[in-house]
Image (tube, rainbow, N blue to C red):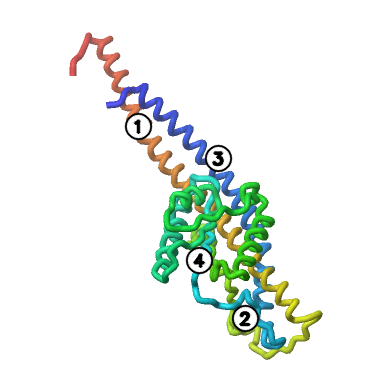
Amino acid sequence: MATMRELKRRINSVQSSQKITAAMKMISSARMRKAEIALNRTLPYEEQLQSILAHVNEKDCDYESPLRKIRPLRQVALICLGSDEGMCGAFNINLYKELLGTIREYASLGIQHPEVYPIGKKMVGYVKRMQNIDYKKSTDLFIEKKYPEAVKVLTDELIARFLQGDVDKVEVIYTHYKSRGTQIVTRLQLLPLLGRKQEEQSGPDRPNLPRVYIYEPDCREIFEILYPLIIRTMFYKTFLENQTSEQATRIIAMQMASDNAYKLLGSLQLEYNKLRQQGITTELLDMAGGNVEE
């Protein structure tokens, strides 16, 4: 049985941990709110670009972008987003498991050493220990937290390598932010670019009517600007979703830790009070009638 001194030490330790988890929860709440604002600002822009992509037609100007060309798979590049900090439950583990499953899937197609771009200190640590992959270091702008510039640099690098034929497909593995209580690990194909169908853009308020466009200055030039912009925006949106999901997961993890600390604290306090009462009772009996052996 633990002594009163040991119990007091454990109680103080749990109380300190409880303060830390409460502070981490407050910090994550503020960060998630900030990430949500950034994500909500990006969504209308990305939606409008996707709408343009769904309506314009390359056939109108006899042009086929190489960024949309589907080629036989010889090499793929996988971007796996993670977190820089811990204390976020199974957030990074779930992403890592999805990465392993994706690598096994491509291995069954004959691609034995896919290229992996890990982002986030935790994910970099996981990937560096992996075998049968081609580890690729991302730009240091992610470490410097210059995220828009980092996304542009990495996206432009992958677009250039896709055009050169070094990779035939690019996917990003991230955690899709559905709500504060629901986050889903997801894979998104960046290259070759897949445009949404016209039917997906139509609806009660958007009838599926034929449209005729006049392209200025030239439709080829427009597509060469539009496609890289869409790819960068898609990647940036997934990055923001992953950041928001990270903070939401951390809030849940810290809340669970606080609840467990509260339950443990109650149990330790009860045991401490029992020992304290037992000591007081023994002293009273000694004073009243001498030493009493139990």
Give yes or no for contact between labels 1 and 3 (Cβ–Cβ under 8 Å): no
Q: Residues within 10 Å of mark 2 (few under 14, many from 20)?
A: some
Residue 202 horizontal/vertical position (percent): 62, 83
Of 77 and 282, the residue lying toward us: 77
Question: Tag 3, which secondary structure?
Answer: helix
- First in sequence: mark 1 vs mark 3: 3
Q: Residues within 10 Å of mark 4 (few under 14, many from 20)?
A: many
Say what amino acid the circle numbered 2 marks. Gln
**Above/below status of 178 relative to 91:** below
User: Could you tell me residue 237's position as x and y percent?
Assistant: 62, 63
Q: Quadrant of the N terminus?
A: top left
- Which residue is denoted by mark 1 in the rendering? 270
Q: Amino acid at mark 4?
A: Arg
- Residue annotated with mark 2: 201
Query: Which residue is pictured at 65% across the width and 72% down the height?
Result: 47
Q: Which of the numbered marks, if any, corresponds to residue 187?
A: 4
Mark 2 and mark 4 lie on one chain; the one further toward the N terminus is 4
Q: 10 Å neighbourhood of mark 3: few (<14), some, or many (≥20)?
A: few
